[in-house]
Amino acid sequence: MTKLRLGPLAEEKPVKLTVEFPGALLRDLAAYAAIHAKLNGLAAALPPERLIPAMVERFMATDRGFASARKSR
């Protein structure tokens, strides 16, 4: 079975932010959401706006350069 980097999402108070994505990226996010839902036993895929913050958080948490620069700040 495929394993995704993004696991179950925690509920948190959202902060509204507006961003623009290319259509191809939005389609890829929808496909990712469908796979994520299947692997995590969800009845339906989450909308991309629920996945994106967790993806960015995961990306930043695993970025060694960012962690190093943040420590030295």
Image (tube, rainbow, N blue to C red):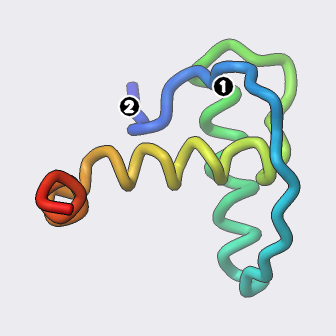
Give the class, few, some or many, for how many residues have Cα within 10 Å of label 1's Cα (few <14, many ≥20): few
Asked if residue 5 is positioned above or below residue 68 in the image, the reply reads: above
Q: Quadrant of residue 21?
A: bottom right
Q: Quadrant of residue 9?
A: top right
Q: Image point 74% across, 25% down: which residue?
A: 12
Residue for badge 1: 38
Q: What numbered label is drawn on residue 71?
A: none
Q: Secondary structure at mark 1?
A: helix
Q: Are marks 1 and 2 in contact (CB under 8 Å)?
A: no
Vertical order, 43 against 5 (above or below): above
Q: Is residue 5 above or below residue 49?
A: above
Position of the C terminus, as image quadrant, is bottom left
Residue type, numbered disc 2: Lys
Residue 72 pos. (x, y %):
12, 60
Q: CA distance from mark 1 to mark 2?
A: 11 Å
> Which callout, 1 or 2, points at the residue further toward the start of the chain?
2
Q: Camera-side residue: 59 or 70?
A: 70
Specify the quadrant that holds the N terminus. top left
Residue pointed to by mark 2: 3
6 left or right of 17? left
Left or right, 36 with respect to 11, comes to left
Report x, y in % for residue 43. Answer: 84, 18
Query: Residue 3 appears in which quarter of the rendering?
Result: top left
Q: Nearer the viewer, residue 5 or 64?
A: 64
Give x and y (percent) for residue 50.
77, 42
Q: Residue at x 61, y 18 (%)?
A: 40
